[in-house]
Image (cartoon, rainbow, N blue to C red):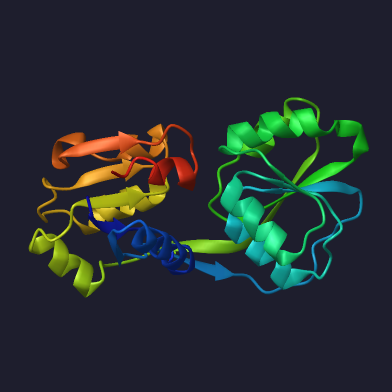
Amino acid sequence: MPMRILVTRPLEDGEAIAETLRAMGHQPLLAPLLRTDFHDGPEPDFAGVQAILASSANGIRALTRRTARRDLPIFAVGPQTADEAQRAGFIEVRNADGDARALAEATMRWTVPDKGALLHVCGEEAPGTLGDTLAGHGFTVWRCALYAVHAARQLPAEVQAALEERALDAALFFSPRSARVFCELAEGLPLAGLTAFCISPVTAKVLKESVFSQVAVASQPNQAALLALLP
């Protein structure tokens, strides 16, 4: 059954998901609640680095703006990040198919601390879960914040109108932060008819279940599992 679905990802990723939703027969509406600003600067220092940890596709996009090197292995958190690295031309890309904890566990299977440091390309707001976990197992992890993510201050006018008119069936949430921003900006709007589809339990926890008709959580923390929830 076709659904009218709100997509809350940043614009570039949201447009790609919208194409997929249309192919599935759904009607997407974009609500880019987060905006990515990539930092300018010199090439990161790769001396002593054995591999690059990428916990988001934006980490890859930011990295390719700062270096032409494609020879270092990429350890990617999930399929979207791995796909971005492959499109960028990186020679060796491995996919942990999960979240930060899954990437830490996979990294410990893929390599050992003695081979060198791990460079974590990330945003300024990225939590330290990945680095802390690996450091606890003897790895040296260098954090390299190459971009910042800023929250929208208001909903797009067409999104607010659609919510007010109860013209949507569902909303997709890909991170705790985007879910939190949506709840703040949509406060007071009628959401009772919406189903919230969440990429992870942590994301779902941000939402007030009583506000939505249903809150559903993907079986795995990746886009494919999230979209598999749709009828």
Task: Work out whether 221 lies above or below 126.
Answer: above
Q: Position of residue 178 (x, y in %)?
A: 37, 53
Give the camera-side residue of 113 and 166: 166
Q: Quadrant of the C terminus?
A: top left
Horizontally, residue 51 falls left or right of residue 55, namely right
- Total marks in image: 0
Give the camera-side residue of 126 and 227: 227
Horizontally, residue 30 falls left or right of residue 11, namely left
In percent of the image, x 82 and y 56: which residue is there? 91
Q: Position of residue 75 (x, y in %)?
A: 73, 45
Horizontally, residue 2 falls left or right of residue 152, namely left
Task: Work out whether 72 lies above or below 109.
Answer: below
Q: Position of residue 97 (x, y in %)?
A: 60, 39
| Residue 185 sits in quarter | bottom left
In percent of the image, x 22 and y 54: which residue is there? 3
| Residue 168 sits in quarter | bottom left
Give the camera-side residue of 20 and 148: 20
Task: Work out whether 75 lies above or below 58.
Answer: above
Q: Position of residue 44 (x, y in %)?
A: 79, 62
Residue 129 in sight from this viewpoint: no
* Outermost residue to the top: 137
Residue 32 in sight from this viewpoint: yes
| Residue 201 sits in quarter | top left
In percent of the image, x 69 and y 58: which residue is there? 85
